[in-house]
Amino acid sequence: MKKRVMCVYDGSRRLWKDDMMLDSEFEVRMKLPKGNGYVTDLDVQTVHRAEYLLDATPEEKGQWIPDNLRNVEYAF
């Protein structure tokens, strides 16, 4: 099993975090045009998903809520 974590950032703003598990038995490998490396079908889909998230409009991205709440001052 392979575990992949995809985090998509827009500057300091994290847009998406996704954990994926894939059994290497079902992995599809495609040779790269130059060299002896390869890319998997999951890698290709991951890049496409990241592109869609980065191309989203501000309305689609929604309001930003910081991940690090230690430095946030609350006004109660």
Image: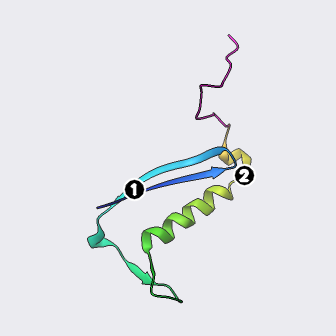
Colour pattern of the rendering? rainbow
- Residue beneath the point at 68% across and 37% down: 63
The quadrant holding residue 28 is bottom left
- Element type where label 2 sits in the image: loop
> Residue 52: x, y in percent?
62, 60
Q: Residue at x 68, y 19 (%)?
A: 73
Residue 17 in the image: state x and y as whole percent. 51, 48
Instruction: Give the x, y percent position of residue 49.
Output: 55, 61
Q: Is residue 12 on the magenta stretch? A: no
Q: Determine the residue located farthest toward the bottom in the rendered image.
A: 34
**Quick check: marks 2 and 1 in contact, CB under 8 Å?**
no
Q: Residue furthest front?
A: 35
Residue position for label 1 = 20
Task: Give the answer, above or below, for where 21 lies relative to 17.
Answer: below
Density class for disc 2 (Cα within 10 Å; few <14, some 14-19, many ≥20) is few
Q: Amino acid at mark 1?
A: Met
Residue 74 within the magenta-colored segment of the rendering: yes
Image coordinates of residue 4 in percent, x first then y, are 41, 58
> According to the image, label 2 marks what residue?
57
Amino acid type of the residue that numbered disc 2 sits on in the rendered structure: Thr
Stretch in magenta: 64-76
Secondary structure that dominates the magenta span = loop
Quarter of the image for the N terminus: give it. bottom left
Counting residues from the N terminus, which is met first, the one under dot 2 or under dot 1?
Answer: 1
Q: Which residue is drawn at the image coordinates 49% and 67% (left, top)?
A: 45
Q: Label 1 neighbourhood size at 10 Å, few (<14), some (14-19), many (20+)? A: few
31 or 35: nearer the eye? Answer: 35
Secondary structure of residue under mark 1: strand
- Determine whether 23 is above or below 67 in the image: below
The residue at the point 34 percent across, 73 percent down is: 27
Which picture quadrant has residue 56? bottom right
